[in-house]
Image (cartoon, rainbow, N blue to C red):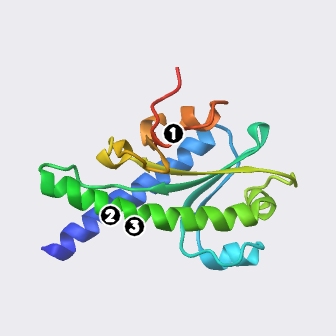
Amino acid sequence: MTELLERHRQQHNNQLETDLAQAAALAALPHSSRLERGPAADAGIPGLTGEIDLLVTDPPHRRLWVIEAKNPHPAIGTHNVSQGLGRFTRYRTKLLTKTDTIRKHAAQAALLCGVDQPGDWTVIPLFVTRNIDPAAFTADPGIAFTTIDHLRALLTDATPPKAGWNQAPT
């Protein structure tokens, strides 16, 4: 039974990653989906510590988005919220490490997405979930959050996202 539930959860995770790439495509932004360590190293980005679910280049605003998809279970009680916040802390550390790697190799990352524009890039870590997650509302989340429904609008908005919850720009 546990194996069946894990397979179901993985299918939901894979669909969310697919939805991320579709949002970037609908926003008409160059991107690379499910970027693994090997292809990243081959593209001149050594030292990536894990897969990047979506790397998006926003040439007009000189931004690179390092996006991590998370599909947490909805928190029902205090214990569930506490567990979710603990997981978020680990996920945040991993995402910030990946973001630092991309920051060091920003021109190569942009080129990997098909954009040949050397120079300074602002590299932004972003968590995307299906539903609003309590971790986005901690005192100092350190990373921007949004939902898949708001991703396309956030990617194309000229205003940089803030740490914590980001709704669709108006």
Res. 134 image quadrant: top left
Q: CA distance from mark 3 to mark 2?
A: 5 Å
Q: For this rendering, which residue is in front, 103 or 32?
A: 103
Instruction: Count neighbours of disc 3 (C-alpha within 10 A) and say few if under 14, some if 14 to 19, many if 20 or more.
Output: few
Write down the residue under mark 3. 90
Q: CA distance from mark 2 to mark 1?
A: 22 Å
Q: Is residue 159 left or right of residue 10?
A: right
Write down the residue under mark 1. 151
Residue 149: x percent and y percent?
A: 43, 36
Residue 46: x percent and y percent?
A: 71, 77
Amino acid, disc 2: Arg
The residue at 77%/50% (across/down) is: 121
Disc number placed over residue 37 in the picture, else none: none
Answer above or below: position of 8 versus 77.
Answer: below
N-term mark: 1 or 3: 3
Q: Mark 1 vs mark 3: give the one in front.
A: 3
N-term mark: 2 or 1: 2
Residue 92: x percent and y percent?
A: 45, 60
Instruction: Count neighbours of disc 2 (C-alpha within 10 A) and say few if under 14, some if 14 to 19, many if 20 or more.
Output: few
